Image (cartoon, coloured by chain):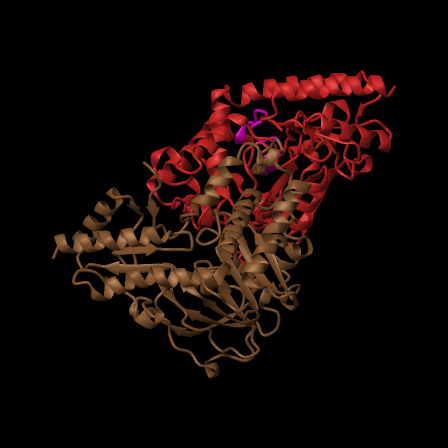
Chain colours: A brown, B red
Amino acid sequence: MSRVFNFSAGPATLPVEVLEKAQKDLVDYKGTGMSVMEMSHRSSDYMAIFDAAIASLRKLMAVPDNYEVMFMHGGASSQFAMVPLNLFSKSKKADYIHTGEWSKKAIAEAKRYGKVNVVASSEDKTFSYIPKVTKDMFDPEADYVHITTNNTIYGTTFPSLPEVGNVPLVADMSSNILAQVYDVSKFGLIYAGAQKNIGPAGVAIVIVRKDLIGKAMDITPTMFNYKTHADNGSMFNTPPTYAIYIAGLVFDWLLERGGVAAMQKINEEKAGWLYDFLDNSSLFKATVEPASRSTMNVPFVTGSDELDATFIKEASAKGLKTLKGHRTVGGMRASIYNAMPQEGVKSLVAFMKEFELRNK
Amino acid sequence: MSRVFNFSAGPATLPVEVLEKAQKDLVDYKGTGMSVMEMSHRSSDYMAIFDAAIASLRKLMAVPDNYEVMFMHGGASSQFAMVPLNLFSKSKKADYIHTGEWSKKAIAEAKRYGKVNVVASSEDKTFSYIPKVTKDMFDPEADYVHITTNNTIYGTTFPSLPEVGNVPLVADMSSNILAQVYDVSKFGLIYAGAQKNIGPAGVAIVIVRKDLIGKAMDITPTMFNYKTHADNGSMFNTPPTYAIYIAGLVFDWLLERGGVAAMQKINEEKAGWLYDFLDNSSLFKATVEPASRSTMNVPFVTGSDELDATFIKEASAKGLKTLKGHRTVGGMRASIYNAMPQEGVKSLVAFMKEFELRNK
């Protein structure tokens, strides 16, 4: 089979141009006589790859100089503990906005190390919207406020950032980092697992304001202390070298295409095609209220479990893969990250139209 | 340049047959229309890869049924904290044998969570030997005894396992796992970073006796609790999927070659060529006492820093790469893991002979 359109929520589709580059250099990277996988992380060849990846990411997100940019092991799930262990430095209180499965896990972990106040939640409607918050709802003494900018499972995105005053805003940006423009200076800390918009699973990115580093709780394992990684340029131990290399290739691919602002425009266009169709369909409907809709993850249903199952099966046979929705929402979900070609979304919409005609 | 011989201590050389397989399938894995990097970790295609990797590892090490085999994030360095956090369940005391830089880090981390007794150390002679220990030196009430089976930096290996009675023996096996036969039932827990004898950096292996799971200290982050990963088949969060895939290819490669016992024989032969030459050389000498020598990492010196530097430079020009020794030992180090072809060691010895003749 030739390349399919893979709508997986993560690990997710990568740019074919990146994969082809990686394939070409897999056994012998640019005449070094070895694979990137085989290079000492401290070799000059690898350090060039690593430094370029950090520089590209800084450029893509216009990261100010007073922020560290680090590659980490352990995915976003490790950050659920690292954030409280490192940031509970004064009041040991934090405000969380609860918008889905991932914020639930983040909240549960933070509660183990301090006091968590759930400022707002959309659990009442299966997380199908982003709750409205105002500045007075936040505790000015909290050590931080935590949000999940994009909710992969439910297909919601914060339409705007909450106003939190001087309290550091912490964001799990796993599923929309590099897909829409954010002003990094509005955040105390941003983290993201790589396997949606960045590269292969097994590496996470942490962007943290430098003044927040170095205040970890005493019980913090050395590998969970941001200071360990900041002091050692993400090389306290061997980093996931190959995953970082692929991430660097993705960063270059984004830069060649005009960066995050250009991708945001394309992402809005791609998601627009799907939502426009869904809002006018007699068979399919979107599950998220319009103001909170994600450009990354688009859940939809027919209303019939049987028809949903038929749709997923027939779509798969046409090379439109991994469209099954998360069990908590049911139906379908199309994850259309940066690397999903416009052609993929067009093919999906065309197939949905055709399926609708046959199943009216 | 064609493929070089890469003597890096880690990340290290991989079997070229594995790299070629990975290259062939990188953009489209066996007709699935996607890269392994892009597969949902819960898809049937990926689960088949994952399950086969676990099964192969179990077979290679003849892991008994009462042991969990897990893939983890975070490298061996995370295990330095995970071991005490999970195993300090009764006396909160542990015995450590101190044989190098890595045991030093392991000891420092364990001290943060309980009482560490350093039973024996070879620090007095720059870790150039494995200290002798007897059963009476160990505390029968300790929660565990920790050793580093092979010391990458200093080039030593435990000639035999210490007798520790009923106390669980914990081993950092990062640099000789799958390179020599061990009886897993002698251990409470084995851990290893992948980037030496297994695959790409970014994944670690933990093999742990099931009765030791589920007793973690309250402060343990969820991601650092073995129970989290045991209960979820290493998929509590997205595992480093591509690194595990490559590890699986390496396991297959080992099985095709007769498994660990066959590799051990080849490794002894390869190391033998080097040590035989070193013991008879008028210019080079090995730094480790004969009884403690590693078949994986062979440090050696000329006695002259200038000559060492010349050797490294000339060797590199001949495609014998990454031979510089660790700064604490100086000189040279040849890491000759499973994937280093016999031809690589022969070429190194031949060049050393030639260099010796020119520099008598």
The residue at the point 34 percent across, 69 percent down is: A123
The residue at the point 72 percent across, 28 percent down is: B317
| Residue in the foreground of this view, choosing between B108 and B288 | B288
Residue B288 locus on image (x, y percent): 77, 27
Give the side of residue B298 with respect to residue A252, left or right: right
Residue B196 locus on image (x, y percent): 60, 34
Quarter of the image with the C terminus of chain B is: top right
Quarter of the image with the N terminus of chain B is: top right
* Quadrant housing residue A326: bottom left
User: Looking at the image, is A132 positioned above or below residue A238?
Assistant: below
| Residue in the foreground of this view, choosing between A97 and B182 | A97
Give the side of residue A148 with respect to residue A287, left or right: right
* Quadrant housing residue B220: bottom right
Residue A272 locus on image (x, y percent): 32, 63
Residue B85 located within the stretch drawn in magenta: no
Residue B183 located within the stretch drawn in magenta: yes
Residues in magenta, as a range: B165-184
User: Looking at the image, is B297 positioned above or below residue A70?
Assistant: above
